[in-house]
Amino acid sequence: MAESPDTHTRTFYGERITWICAGTLQELLALKAKYPEAPLVAGNTSLAMKSPGHFHSVLLSLAGVPDLTMVTKSSDGLTIGAGCSLAQVKDILAESISELPEEKTQTYRALLKHLRSLAGQQIRNMASLGGHVFSRHCYSDLNPILSVGNATLNLLSEEGTRQIPLNGHFLAGLVDLKPEEILGSVYIPHSQKWEFVSAFRQAQCQQNALPDVNACMRVRLREGTDAIEDLSIAYGGVGPTTISAHRSCQQLLGRRWNALMLDEACRRLLDEVSIPGSALGGKVEFKRTLVVSFFFKFYLEVLQELKKKEKLSSESADSQHYPVIADRFLSALEDFQVTLPQGVQTYQRVDPGQPLQDPVGRPIMHLSGFKHATGEAIFCDDIPRVDKELFMALVTSTRAHARIISIDSSEAFALPGVIDVVTAEDIPGTNGDEDDKLLAVDKVLCVGQIICAVVAETDVQARRATEKIKITYEDLKPMIFTIEKTLECLDAIKHSSFLCPEKKLEQGNIEEAFKNVDQIVEGEVHVGGQDHFYMETQRVLIIPKTEDKELDIYVSTQDPAHVQKTVSSTLSIPSNKITCHVKRVGGGFGGKVGKPAVFGAIAAVGAVKTGRPIRLVLDREDDMLITGGRHPLFGKYKVGFMNSGRIKALDIECYINGGCTLDDSELVTEFLVLKLENAYKIRNLRLRGRACMTNLPSNTAFRGFGFPQGTLITESCITAVAAKCGLPPEQIREKNMYKTVDKTIYKQAFNPEPLIRCWKECLDKSSFPVRRTQVEEFNQKSYWKKRGIAVVPMKFSVGFAATSYHQAAALVHVYTDGSVLVAHGGNELGQGIHTKMLQVASRELKIPMSHMHICETSTAMVPNTIATAASIGSDVNGRAVQNACQILLKRLEPIIKKNPEGTWRDWIETAFEKRISLSATGYFRGYKAFMDWERQEGDPFPYYVYGAACSEVEIDCLTGAHRKIRTDIVMDACSSLNPAIDVGQKVHLFREWAFIPQKSCTIPQKVSCTPEVQMSTKFQLSLMSQSSSM
């Protein structure tokens, strides 16, 4: 750090960037004149929004300039310093609202309403008012209000001050701003008498989400009348900038505030606020609806205020009479409030006869819970930097389907700190599979495919060098992105672009059954993709040892054995020289089953080539670009049924978007087809599934593994039948559910008794019949708000469809001080598997859990492990731990019999003296599971878990806003090892697999294609803030 002669200014010098903290406003203005291109930084909350690789050599911090946080109150308005945080602005506005008459605070109330939902509290604490205003984002929640409210910007420079209106010209970037100017403050005038201001916002959720559309509307009526004297309307989210509907407003001046004006206004607004079909973010029809819906709400709000004024002046003989709002329309005026969720969980109690020291079945807190909450839990990238460590960054394809002509890394090598560039030619062993290369050779199949990697002294140097790798491409055809054809993209179905053969199950005579039904309905279902969005991105640390080509690999994965095997084949060294360590994983959801092996292998090549440790950590954008997610699905169904609701025939055909390589898509297709029937017994049934090959990153395992998408199709079919029969959907579900012991479509024996019990208990606990009546009564009274209630059953199969994937092993050591070290093949994904394993060991060894410890999952301790996935981890690994402990206890039995009054430590010391082994390997051979697709039969699953969920929701028909009123979930999860952990896990499980599908399965995460058929690499992140540096 270096200080300027003026001690108030502090300067920090980095390798490429200089950070200057001014102490006074005058110093800041002088610095801005000296560095006119340098941005001002306050909260810096929009860092994630900057384009990749973009940086400024000088940054000016205003944190030490108190003049920019000054607040001035005058008789006609409020001036707020541009450096005030949004949280401070919120408090300032709330204070002014409490002090001023209501008629003067209309604009302030609108601002305060949006400040309650803008971004999240952490963002509002840091983001500045000036940064938000000057960023001029098209989705800004505050700028439309400030524009409509006639706010003024006070600009400062060494030359002096000037004021400019915060209007549509400024927000459209049509006002010339001098580079040496800064925003000093924002003046917001009081609203006037007979002026009404309202703000509106519709987003995917009420906080931490960018709006689909927002708006602010202000009208001033001629005093004592309903004639429009002034009108101003601004929309955000409908164009590249905030849009002002100036022309429409001018044409409505003088009109009376009535239904005729409303009709004309809606037509004019739709004409002026034009949203092209290719608009960024899509949802064009939805946004057009919001344009008029928001104005309709504003119309009603103003009418309601006018009726209040009419009541106050009703004694006057010449009082104005305004249109009456029907009671059933009043629901349009009520916004859904943000409320804290509340819940009650119940679970089975342990047998009263169970010994108090036996922890199995008891609600014991996650042993790492406090560490997670305090930040003390160590994850992969928390491991301190090791000696001579290097950093790796990946170079990915920018083309969806192309031949690689050349790779030029000369500019990258010229940068400081760059050590090497790893390409496919550096791989000594196998470069992945023939159709799924670790590093691309000759051609690329999607945007985001890894081509090479840069190794450098620091992560910043490595990332900077990736931008200097010059790759020449030659585009190839076809480029396929979607399952079905769209306006811009070719489709996989038409081009017969598939990754694997069709998977099919069929029973009965479906064609004959369709001839003997009362009605037939056909439909289509589309389910979008979903990113894993685990909190800890993909990361790995490779440490080569000094001899024998040994490697230590610290990796965030659900399957360390797969990482070990992949690295072994890539480097052409045996697995016994590679040890994978997994302390804990910061979320996986299936996304860390296969992909970590790819990153581990590439990093291992770099480590071997350089002879130094390599750390590879993906940032969020690269993680979302390179890795796949949940498979998007297109499904078609044809259902034949009787008027009573009994389904006689059902034909479902599904296509999933697998991406450019097979990955787990064939398995997902198989599980999708196997689970499509859900809880229903339909005698004549045909289920088919295909995985489509497209030029997108390969989609992979995701919690539910095809079940959420499949369930949505099945339940949509049930709902369609109910609508045609005029019967409640729950009656159709119950009529077609399994009733007695039977066989599934794949001929596995199945007892539905637990399913039926869950169904009946859910109906009872949720008071479903009473609440359905209440919902119907509500909907009759309310025109714009509607409620719905539904109850859905679930039959979910756990495990893999192969016997070998259910085996597990464990290793238990007892030390002479009596302490116990447990190792097993499961990985701690935050779901408490280590806690549960110690509970099992504690029961078997009959000693407290405090005597025990699990260090990590390591391939050196327990070899040949199976991925922690498919809801089977605690089950099979618990059996292995149980077996190991039973072996140890059997060895100790003679000693315990001789000294029954001795302590655990006494027995262990005696065993050591008698040369009895205090280490044991436990093993569980697993459940038998198989599936013969040729014969369409098998026993693919060890067992099922069952559940039912009832959910009641309310929706605003004008905007699509919705709220969940209540959800009841009943689940039979067998015998819980730890209810405190399992209640959360099972609620999440059911929410993901049965409840969420009724709400369209996922929050939309769109991978879009431009007309030039280039894949967009930007995702709409719900957590991105609207605030910015000044």
Image: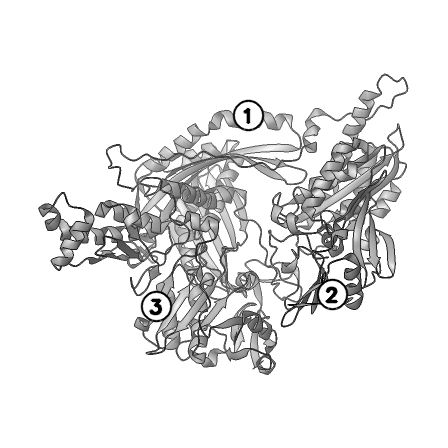
Q: Decide which of tag 3 and tag 1 comes sooner along the chain.
A: 3
Q: Quadrant of the N terminus?
A: bottom right
Give how far across and how far down residue 198 sits, in percent. Answer: 76, 38
What kind of colouring is applied to the model shown? one colour
Which mark's residue is nearer the viewer, 1 or 2?
A: 2
Dot 2 amino acid type: Ala
Q: Are marks 1 and 2 in contact (CB under 8 Å)?
A: no
Give how far across and how far down residue 553 sits, in percent. Answer: 39, 68
Give how far across and how far down residue 763 sits, in percent. Answer: 43, 30
Residue ID for mark 2: 38
The residue sitting at the left extreme is 898
Residue ID for mark 3: 579
Q: Are marks 3 and 1 in contact (CB under 8 Å)?
A: no
Return the residue nearer the eye: 523 or 47: 47
Residue ID for mark 1: 774
Return the residue nearer the eye: 960 or 24: 24
Q: Residues within 10 Å of mark 1 (few under 14, many from 20)?
A: few
What whole-number distance in Å separates the C-alpha atoms at marks 3 and 2?
48 Å
Dot 3 amino acid type: Thr
Secondary-structure class at tag 2: loop
What whole-number distance in Å separates the C-alpha atoms at marks 1 and 2?
61 Å
Image position of 492 with respect to 782: above or below = below
Secondary-structure class at tag 1: helix
Is residue 861 in sight in this rendering? yes
Q: Decide which of tag 3 and tag 2 comes sooner along the chain.
A: 2
Give how far across and how far down residue 820 sits, in percent. Answer: 26, 54
Which mark's residue is nearer the viewer, 3 or 1?
A: 3
What whole-number distance in Å separates the C-alpha atoms at marks 3 and 1?
61 Å
Name the image quarter holding residue 664: bottom left
